[in-house]
Amino acid sequence: MKKIAEYLVTTRKELNDKNASLKERKLALMSVPYLKYLDLSQIDFWEENYSNDIELLFNLYVAQGVHHKGLRRVIWNKNDLNYDYYDPFSLKNKSKQNKSQLRRLMNSTARPIIFIFILAILLLLMLFILSSSIGSAIFSYAFGTMIGIDLIFISLILYRNRIVMDATEKINNQYPDLIKGLDLEEQK
């Protein structure tokens, strides 16, 4: 938090005072933990509109799923300078803006999660068939182990999804007009 505060208070002011190039500003941003994953236009937008709420900046970081790519709920639209809601687990996406960007995001985030689930189910099915037909204790043990691993994996995904949803809900409670296309009542 010390580095983030130093960047937001001191470094950005120095860069703005000397009219630093975009490249210099991005390089300075890359040296700051957490903020380096955000776009420079996001930081500018936050500074212009919400500079007194540093927790909002962190919640936006979490809601964008920077460390939870397959679970992200918010997408920064730097052309329109706003945030769009995105649900990777929904078949019907609420945001109608930037459909090509959302489609590209769906291809890069939710599909690997779906692929892992299908692969795990097929592997479990194969182990179950082998343990049933052969009756070997090794296959039964492997089947039980795979079920345990799958349950841990699913629990981890659900836990991380809850963290991202909590951050999205906090943002929506404080600033209801900040995220476009978000209707939490409809989600429940």
Image (cartoon, rainbow, N blue to C red):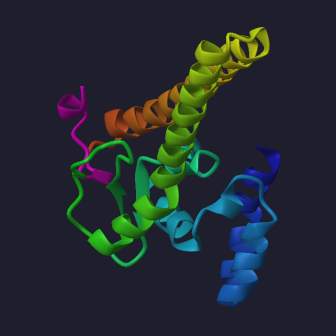
* 166 vs 38: above or below: above
Quarter of the rendering occupied by the N terminus: top right
Residue lying at the far front of the rendered structure: 134
Q: Residue at x 39, y 48 (%)?
A: 88
Counting from the top left corner in percent of width and height, residue 95 is at: 24, 57
Give the quadrant of residue 37. bottom right
Q: Which residue is depicted at the point 24% across and 32% down?
A: 187
Count of numbered labels shown in the rendering:
0
Image height of 143 relative to 87, above or below: above
Image quadrant containing the C terminus: top left
Q: Which residue is pictured at 69% across the width and 91% down the height?
A: 21
In the image, 20 versus 154, the foreground residue is: 154
Q: Residue at x 59, y 72 (%)?
A: 40
Relative to residue 125, is residue 181 drawn left or right? left
Say if the magenta span includes residue 57: no
Is residue 180 magenta-colored? Answer: yes
- Position of residue 186 relative to residue 148, above or below, is below
The reply to whether residue 129 is in sight is yes
**Viewer-side residue, 59 vs 5:** 59
Q: Position of residue 74 (x, y in %)?
A: 41, 52
Looking at the rendering, the stretch of residues picked out in magenta corresponds to 177-188
What x and y, as percent, mark residue 26?
70, 77
Q: Position of residue 56 (x, y in %)?
A: 51, 44
